Amino acid sequence: MTEPVISLRGVTAELGSRPVLRGIDLTVARGEVVALLGANGSGKSTAVRTIIGQVPVSAGEIELFGTPRRRFRDWARVGYVPQRTTAAGGVPATVTEIVSSGRLSRARFGVLGKADRAAVRGALELVGMADRAKDSVNALSGGQHQRVLIARALAAEPQLLIMDEPMAGVDLASQEVLARTLREQVAAGATVLLVLHELGPLEPLIDRAVVLRDGCVLHDGPPPPALGQHALPGHDHVHPHGPTRSGLLS
């Protein structure tokens, strides 16, 4: 068997003095699509932020592509889409400029060549934003911002995609575009770790669901039946007489 693309063993992390992850184990194999699920505050976003080095771990080991994260340098292999942000952070920029910034890790001496520009155009086409390439990102809707952020991650042609709630606050049309884009990446061999509030249109793509609760792994395996419609086992919305239809996680 090949080394897992992502491996967390006994990872503990705190925010301030508050424990957020309590010794979690998580592996993501090459070509696998894994959804991290859990209620707000369960630790799922913190888990992905430890993987990319934004949150330090106080115990445990993290490896990327078989290399301890503290020694991992090949970040062009990793595409990251953060949670609930705007594409330019308020800075005036065009759609192409934002997506091009995702290619700089592969560009020679930081200068985009012909292949780099082609990769940027391809990423924009994948997310259905090629017709907005010259527009200011400040003129975009929330769903379009999210598409631009995903195109920025795809521009580097990463082998691993880590996406933190990519569907949050996104209109249905953009959700369908993002689902189609992700299907194409998976078909091309990408490995994907998604933080999700609910499975929605991504449900057919998910190989495994890892459910966190209070910083611990509650479930690791196939998505529980009807997960896209019902509350999770052990979640606060599960009632003793059966699940509600109030949606997945709040």
Image (cartoon, helix red, strand yellow):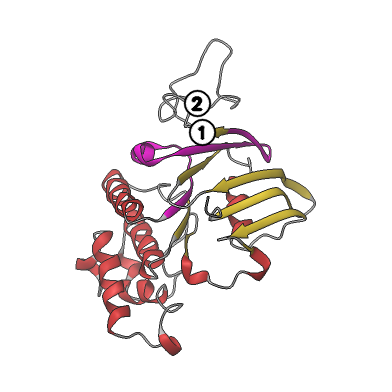
Residue 196: give x, y in percent of width and height: 47, 43
**Do the residues under discs 2 and 1 have CB atoms within 8 angstroms?**
yes
Residue 181: give x, y in percent of width and height: 30, 54
Q: Does the magenta stretch include residue 152?
A: no
* Residue drawn at the location 33% of the way across and 39% of the way down: 201
Counting the numbered discs, the total is 2
Q: Is residue 82 above or below residue 121?
A: above
Count residues near mark 1 (Cα–Cα under 10 Å), then give few for <14, some for 14-19, many for 20+: some
153 on left or right of 140: right
Q: Is residue 121 above or below residue 60?
A: below
In the picture as drawn, the residue positioned furthest to the right comes out as 17
Q: What stretch is highlighted in magenta?
A: 191-219
Q: Helix or strand or loop: what does disc 1 sit on? A: loop
Q: Does the magenta stretch include residue 210?
A: yes
Count residues near mark 2 (Cα–Cα under 10 Å), then give few for <14, some for 14-19, many for 20+: many
93 on left or right of 128: right
Looking at this view, is 73 or 175 the one in front? Answer: 73
Q: In which quarter of the image is residue 119?
A: bottom left
* Residue drawn at the location 41% of the way across and 30% of the way down: 228
Looking at this view, is 165 or 93 the one in front? Answer: 165
* Residue drawn at the location 77% of the way across and 48% of the way down: 18
Q: Mark 2 points at which residue?
A: 231
Three-letter code, disc 2? Ala
Q: Mark 1 points at which residue?
A: 249
